[in-house]
Image (spheres, rainbow, N blue to C red):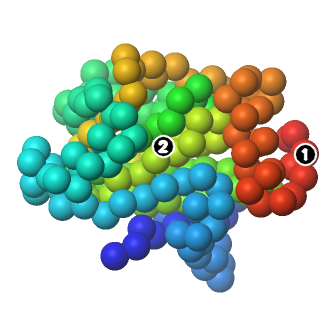
């Protein structure tokens, strides 16, 4: 089953709500791929011995793994961390997350600077390219267990918007512009 994604409304209501536009405007996997967002659907019940996950890790060089429970009972400084996760930012490296339990939303910006909400659920492995503006929040279930993957030593440093001069952002724009064949303006 494909991941669910849609264009978000402009409401400032609870960030954990779906924030569908009216009428709903869904985003396809092809549209996400044009932004550099990749997705696999895996079996989270067998993640410790999953050959498909092992192949993805080997093919992409992901040699670091840890697990993160995001919920008030298990994440120290829960409110502060959730606020930080929801602040729009980029990373200098890919962001790779595999949802093992629970659910949440990754929001990414499209070429027109509109938010696209991506709902991750158990089995969804998502890769956000370096330099893409994004943020994360839980949904109303208030819980997710994520596997974080990384090439080499993990660097979790977020660079909050604006970051148009950051090398990762410049490379993302260059790659996206060449891929899509459109000119992007810095916002």
- Is 51 located above or below residue 86 in the figure? below
Q: Nearer the viewer, mark 2 or mark 1?
A: 1
Q: Quadrant of residue 10?
A: bottom right
Q: Nearer the viewer, residue 162 or 148?
A: 148
Say which residue appears at 80% left-offset and 24% top-offset: 165
Answer whether residue 186 is visible to the viewer in this image: yes
* Chain-order first, disc 2 or disc 1: 2
Q: Residue at x 29, y 29 (%)?
A: 63
Query: In this view of the protein, which residue sits in the foreground, 90 or 59?
Result: 59
Judge whether 95 appears above or below 80 on screen: below
Please count the marks in the image: 2
Q: Is residue 150 left or right of residue 10?
A: left
**Is 52 drawn above or below residue 137 in the view shown?**
below
Q: Residue at x 73, y 50 (%)?
A: 176
179 lies left or right of 150: right
Quadrant of image for the N terminus = bottom left
Q: What's the mark number on residue 163?
A: none
Q: Residues within 10 Å of mark 1 (few under 14, many from 20)?
A: few
The kind of secondary structure element at disc 2 is strand
Across and down, in percent, residue 174 comes to 78, 42
Q: In the image, residue 6 lies at what x, y percent?
A: 57, 68
Residue 45, position in %: x, y?
10, 56
Q: Secondary structure at mark 1?
A: loop
Reading the image, the residue beneath label 1 is 185
Instruction: Please identify the residue farthest to the bottom as the structure is shown.
Output: 23
Q: Residue at x 31, y 64 (%)?
A: 41
Mark identifier at residue 136: 2
Q: Are marks 2 and 1 in contact (CB under 8 Å)?
A: no
């Amino acid at each position: 089953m494909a991941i669910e994604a849609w264009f978000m409304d402009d409401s400032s209501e609870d960030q954990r709500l779906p924030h569908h536009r009216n009428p709903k405007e869904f985003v396809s996997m092809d549209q996400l791929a044009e932004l550099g967002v990749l997705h696999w659907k895996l079996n989270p019940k067998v993640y410790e011995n999953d050959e498909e996950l092992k192949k993805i890790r080997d093919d992409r060089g992901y040699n670091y793994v840890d697990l993160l429970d995001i919920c008030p009972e298990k994440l120290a400084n829960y409110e502060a961390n959730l606020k930080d996760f929801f602040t729009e930012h980029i990373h200098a490296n890919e962001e790779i997350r595999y949802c093992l339990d629970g659910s949440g939303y990754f929001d990414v910006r499209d070429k027109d600077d509109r938010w696209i909400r991506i709902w991750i659920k158990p089995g969804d492995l998502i890769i956000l390219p370096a330099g893409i503006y994004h943020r994360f929040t839980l949904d109303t279930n208030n819980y997710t267990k994520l596997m974080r993957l990384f090439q080499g030593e993990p660097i979790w440093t977020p660079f909050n918007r604006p970051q148009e001069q950051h090398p990762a952002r410049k490379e993302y724009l260059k790659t996206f512009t060449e891929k899509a064949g459109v000119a992007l303006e810095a916002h």
